[in-house]
């Protein structure tokens, strides 16, 4: 028997088994006897002094067990920063329930605990808030104000720079300057948030059910905030109906169910409704960039100045300034850039707090940078692709270090052939012929155009991940990991890697994740890190288990270890095709603690594997969009869309494609449809799906995916790079360019989303027609 | 700061915190939404052909979800043997539900699953069984019969022997022969059994809540019986209201809740009632011994022939022949014995199946052997203590190997000074003065007497145990073990050992046990093994954690490691009393995976510790009883009772005393009160506490405990021996001897329990008076 490779095969997802049979277990499915239900009373006012909360009517309702206001949480820390204390930003943390002021519509002011969810909601509606309204601060790009004495709404500045930026502009052949805006939008998972808190006094164990994304990290900071031993707190991840970076962060509601479970001594459940989700879960993306580039006569970048205004909303949440920091560090993308200066104004406003959403800082900076490249092309009269080619970092410059930082690391692109991928993509798209066809159509009056946007992604955030691989006495394999599954196919990927290394059927492997009681450390699912970090740790652990199995089997079979392999779960002799074999169950039995056969070996056919890395990996790609614009309605039809992506090595190409296509659909939302808008009082206008438009299958075009493996990562043994954010990353960028092209209006698009109204207004403005 | 010893201190129990506050969580407290309740329909007939089960009326009751009979379990294995297949005994395993025959009153015949427990019970009562009654086999000591063609009720013979037994008897100065009976009784925990089965389809995880004693072992054989991956099954131990060896074995009811959880797709709960417990949980002890000893002129033992009849009841349960095997291997006790032959008839009867109960085979053999020693004394006209002294193995013969086996191991007494303990005990008791006092009272007509019974216990069954010790970033310590807590103070003992090694406060340590999802292997709580095996593994793991902490702290503190100690959870300099110190939280933070400080160290301030041992340890002791007998009523009053026990090294003397005193109370039950009796149809007569008498505080005398540490075990670094069975082991033996002495009737007591009726009858028989 020979082994056939599992890594690289588009095998079906193992996590689909319960899901397709309706046996998924989401947080809404989790119930405990005697549980209470929580409903949050939220501020209807964007900014005001909270003078009083009248909950008398609610308290009088039978079945209402408790109502808490901020006063009940005296001494409980505001939601802390994940990476530990930050003195400068500490004053801007969100209290779990508002105390003296309210700062956004949707801010939790009171919590109602009742016997059922309907009663809790009814009771919450009787709670009246006495709020003295204050003028809201809604723009992050005007002069900063103050929410409390001594604390400007410019909470901090984020800066990064290198090179002689003054010199770059002094010797520029040309300077191109743009003012660009990315709209406020965010992840809208099919499943809203939820949490069930439970305290088991018998074991002094506090449990959070409904965890996602970063269960171990959240456990750590729940322990810190509650002053309880970390080993007495456990987070459990059920099925997760979409994460996208926003779900699984620690929110006030999580802390409330935990505190209530402790104080009321009953399990407490909270399920978010859609309206709440749209005003209470993290927003993202809203930035205004005033950016300018200095170029030489041939269009080579000499320097970029990137001043931007980050609209953080009302509070600084768990991530601190990560999006703004990354905006500084990642803007240059695939291009050589001798000098750079980024200055980010990290500003608070009276809106929902913001944090990371799939491809944070890249979606924004790809739009901004690629708009800049287009503008340079226009300014120098060069084709847009030519300007890009001249500036692309070449493969022989790899690894390419830039004196910038992102996610706490020095930016070092590990490998890549950006120009090579551009060539392959244009060939695959049939770029020349396609453009010729568009020219002909434009000549006939059709508003069609195509464009290319390039991007560098980041993935595989380290520095470390560890898993445990166990083969039990029934021969079954379990991989226990502190990674998390937010729907991306994590279990399948990990099973494939384990299967490949260990020589077993991937479909029989059990991948246990998101449970802090099963493994001491874990990093969860974020920053497109899981495949790289957890994957490589799995390979290391599986290789150790394999070595142990072969060592034990060699003794049992009286065979030389170097003549043994594991195929389909059996240790076989490589030199005797029909020779003896023993299955892993037998090997595992020979290694149980009491087995005499195990000799001096540590008990168990199991091993921990740790993977350490000094750097993230940087996959890269590009998008080619061909669009048709309806000038009358402002509607944009995407006629063709190709996403090329070099992943280094794909574990499961089908899942990579799934990530890319799904990501594109979300990117399309931010590019054309989705926006959290507010009126002048700070009232959110997008709190239903009638107002917050997300693209459906009807709006999402067929996507052509060109997946390449030209640049395996040298940073990890498997050579893999992440795929989670590839599809979304450059959608705003490429659609903006293509619309410019379609309309023949250079530099038309300066703001996302490109809603029909906004596009129509832009067209009219461009034509010099004044609109009302 | 200096460290004060924790091992050896009688500190309060950490497990009492939830218990004394009413926050214990027993299996009865465990509930899941949508759970069903199971009630077992049991055979009212001791032996019969099962012709039919009519459940039509029950099925028609609203809220009854399912009713299963044996036919519904086609293909499901009978309850298997814990140690793996045993071809010879396989035919005698108990089916989960009876198929064609019933073999004892209480045998599960059908299972009713309903929406609540009351309904389930009501429905079960409407189920009618069509049973053709067969003559029951109730005596194990008459000619064997057959339950099925080709299978004698003598399921097997258990034999062990060494030396030239024929020669011993041939050259004997005298031969003493006895016919002795130990009554059928068992553990009667305050909490009856219970089990909750639950299947989580989302994770394909089958759970058994309510596990006790051996959760890991049970998981292994549940997996085998159900043909499911072991990693997909987890057992969870809640609080346990008494174990005593009988609770936590895998019973038909456990398998039924699991199967029902899978098939009915709802959690299924079963709680045993007291009547069920007394007829369905394992019985124990019932043996008849025909024993004879060959002695020389001075009373030295030359040989013992030990033929016995073990009444196993209707089926062979999880333990197989362990009690009978141990009866062979352990009978010789503390005495030198040149030749020995044991022949055990392992017989089935139509009674409740039997297995191990606290001090299995020792309670029985101590009674038998000590009765034999008394008879030898009488025969040779020697004082009973003198005969014992002449035969005691001396301390310079230690370690003392005997060519016998018990619990799968060669019997090697590791250390002991039996005569020394006898001397100490007699001195502590004031034996001479006391006996003089008794003589004076006897002279006045009082029926008072005192006796000594000696015993060797066994404890610390290996071969291996492992624990994990974790210090988290909050500085909290958790010991994760596959041991189990059945009320014995396990958590406290383990915390004390960990505290001593690690230098932290024992009261702050969390001991996690009895959860198969927290640690891969575990051996549970049986055979008085936990302190020895889990304790030593804990010491090893804690020492590793200590070493890691000091290594890391040395780097952080820039101090030489050999000048560092851990005191009260802080690493301090031993050479600088007021010098710098850092707490373990800081050290743990320096060792998290992402910490640069950890350098090349494995992540985590944690370690596994494995303890391997080649042999059990053999603690030893003796009991001195002084009793007064009321000839008219047959009542026995215990006037003084001393238990001397050498434990090698006591971790917590208070808990050892607790074990000893509690054990004595149970032993007293088997000696005087408790008996499962049957009428001639095999109908059990002891199915309520009105008929099955357990001693209360009123019947239990004050116990004098002499705890010595003269013979630490050389088998483990801590030198400890077990304590779980010390108090119960020789109660039958010592009371029998003391009653003989009180009445001045040598050899009067030949059967336990010594109920008033039985004692009165024996007295009358001894006097030659014929009773009806």
Image (cartoon, coloured by chain):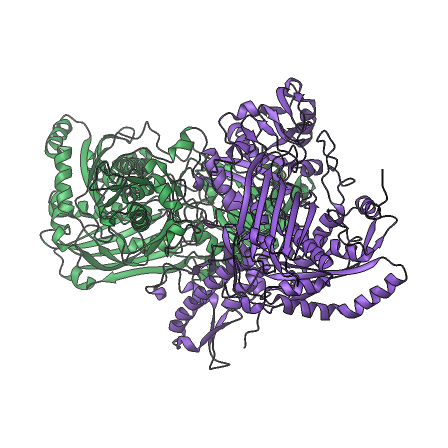
Chain colours: A green, B purple
**B570 to B676, vertically: above or below:** below
**B223 to A71, vertically: above or below:** above
**B52 to A662, vertically: above or below:** above
Along the line of sight, which residue is nearer the eye, A75 or B461?
B461
Q: Residue furthest right?
A: B444
Magenta stretch bounds: A513-526
Q: Could you tell me if residue A211 is visible in this image?
A: yes
Q: What residue is rendered at 71% in x and 48% in y?
A: B670
When asked about the image quadrant of residue A227, the answer is bottom right
Q: Is residue B514 magenta?
A: no
Where does the N terminus of chain A fall, quadrant-wise? top left
Q: Position of residue A300 (x, y in %)?
A: 12, 53
Q: What residue is rendered at 74% in x and 56% in y?
A: B737
When asked about the image quadrant of residue B186, the answer is top right
| Side of A567 where A19 appears, left or right | right
**A701 to A269, vertically: above or below:** above
Q: Position of residue A292 (x, y in %)?
A: 22, 53
Q: Position of residue A448 (x, y in %)?
A: 19, 31
Along the line of sight, which residue is nearer the eye, A189 or A496?
A496
Along the line of sight, which residue is nearer the eye, B429 or B83?
B429
Q: Main secondary structure of the magenta part?
A: loop
| Side of B298 where A623 appears, left or right | left
Q: Could you tell me if residue A201 is visible in this image?
A: no
Q: How many marks?
A: 0
Where does the C terminus of chain A fall, quadrant-wise? top left
Along the line of sight, which residue is nearer the eye, B288 or B73?
B288
Q: What residue is rendered at 86% in x and 61% in y?
A: B442
Q: Position of residue B756 (x, y in %)?
A: 81, 46
Q: What residue is rendered at 41% in x and 66% in y?
A: B548
């Amino acid at each position: 028997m020979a082994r056939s490779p599992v890594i690289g095969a588009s095998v079906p997802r193992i996590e689909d088994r319960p899901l397709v049979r309706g046996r998924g277990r989401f947080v809404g499915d989790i119930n405990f006897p005697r549980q209470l239900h929580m409903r949050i009373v939220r501020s209807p006012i964007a900014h005001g002094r909270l003078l009083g909360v009248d909950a008398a009517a609610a308290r009088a309702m039978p079945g209402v067990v408790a109502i808490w206001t901020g006063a009940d949480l005296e001494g409980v820390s505001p939601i802390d920063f994940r990476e530990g204390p930050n003195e400068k930003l500490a004053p801007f943390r969100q209290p779990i329930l508002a105390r003296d002021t309210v700062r956004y519509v949707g801010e939790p002011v009171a919590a109602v605990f009742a016997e059922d969810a309907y009663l809790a909601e009814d009771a919450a509606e009787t709670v009246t808030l006495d709020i003295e309204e204050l003028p809201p601060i809604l723009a992050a790009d005007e002069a900063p104000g103050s929410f409390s004495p001594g604390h400007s709404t410019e909470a901090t500045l984020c800066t990064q720079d290198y090179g002689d930026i003054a010199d770059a502009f002094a010797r520029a052949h040309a300077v191109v300057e743009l003012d660009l805006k990315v709209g406020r939008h965010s992840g809208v998972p099919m499943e809203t948030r939820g949490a069930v808190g439970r305290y088991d006094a018998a074991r002094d164990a506090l449990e959070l059910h409904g965890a996602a994304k970063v269960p171990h990290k959240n456990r750590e900071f729940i322990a810190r905030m509650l002053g309880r031993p970390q080993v007495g707190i456990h987070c459990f991840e059920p099925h997760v109906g979409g994460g996208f970076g926003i779900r699984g962060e620690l929110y006030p509601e999580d802390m409330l169910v935990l505190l209530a479970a402790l104080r009321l001594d009953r399990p407490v459940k909270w399920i978010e409704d859609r309206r709440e989700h749209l005003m209470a879960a993290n927003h993202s993306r809203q930035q205004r960039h005033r950016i300018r580039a200095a170029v030489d006569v041939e269009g080579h970048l000499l320097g970029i100045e990137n001043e931007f205004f980050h609209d953080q909303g009302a509070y600084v949440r768990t991530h601190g300034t990560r999006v703004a920091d990354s905006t500084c560090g990642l803007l240059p993308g695939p291009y050589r850039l001798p000098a750079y200066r980024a200055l980010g104004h990290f500003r608070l406003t009276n809106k929902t707090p913001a944090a990371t959403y799939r491809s944070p800082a890249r979606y924004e900076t790809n739009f901004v940078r690629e708009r800049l490249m287009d503008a340079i092309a226009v300014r120098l009269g060069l084709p847009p692709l030519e300007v890009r080619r001249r500036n692309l970092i070449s493969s022989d410059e790899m690894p390419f270090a830039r004196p910038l930082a992102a996610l706490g690391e020095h930016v070092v692109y590990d490998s890549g052939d950006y120009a090579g991928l551009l060539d392959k993509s244009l060939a695959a798209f049939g770029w020349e012929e396609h453009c010729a066809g568009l020219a002909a159509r434009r000549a006939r009056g059709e508003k069609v155009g195509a464009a290319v946007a390039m991007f560098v992604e980041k993935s595989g955030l380290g520095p470390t991940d560890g898993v445990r691989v166990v083969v039990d006495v029934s021969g079954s394999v379990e991989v226990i990991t502190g990674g998390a599954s937010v729907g991306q196919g994590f279990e399948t990927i990990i099973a494939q890697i384990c299967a490949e290394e260990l020589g077993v059927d991937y479909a029989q492997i059990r991948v246990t994740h998101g449970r802090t009681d099963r493994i001491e450390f874990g990093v969860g699912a974020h920053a497109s890190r899981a495949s790289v970090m957890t994957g490589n740790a799995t390979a290391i652990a599986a290789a150790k288990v394999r070595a142990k199995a072969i060592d034990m089997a060699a003794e049992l079979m009286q065979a030389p270890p170097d003549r043994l392999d594991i195929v389909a779960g059996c240790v076989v002799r490589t030199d005797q095709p029909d020779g003896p074999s023993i299955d892993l169950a037998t090997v595992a039995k020979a290694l149980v603690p009491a087995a005499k056969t195990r000799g001096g070996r540590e008990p168990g056919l199991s091993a921990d594997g740790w993977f350490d890395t000094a750097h993230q990996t940087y996959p890269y790609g590009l998008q080619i969009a061909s669009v048709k614009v309806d000038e009358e309605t402002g509607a944009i039809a995407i006629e063709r869309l190709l996403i090329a992506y070099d992943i280094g090595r794909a574990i499961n190409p089908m899942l990579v494609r799934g990530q890319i296509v799904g990501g594109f659909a979300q990117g399309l939302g931010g590019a054309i449809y989705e926006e959290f808008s507010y009126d002048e009082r700070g009232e959110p206008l997008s709190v239903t799906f009638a107002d917050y438009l997300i693209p459906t299958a009807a709006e999402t075009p067929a996507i052509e995916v060109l997946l390449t493996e030209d640049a395996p990562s040298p940073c990890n043994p498997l050579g893999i790079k992440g795929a989670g954010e590839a599809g979304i990353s450059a959608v705003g960028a490429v659609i903006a360019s293509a619309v410019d092209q379609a309309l023949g209006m250079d530099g038309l698009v300066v703001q996302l989303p490109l809603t029909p109204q906004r596009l129509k207004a832009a067209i009219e403005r461009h034509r010099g027609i004044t609109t009302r």
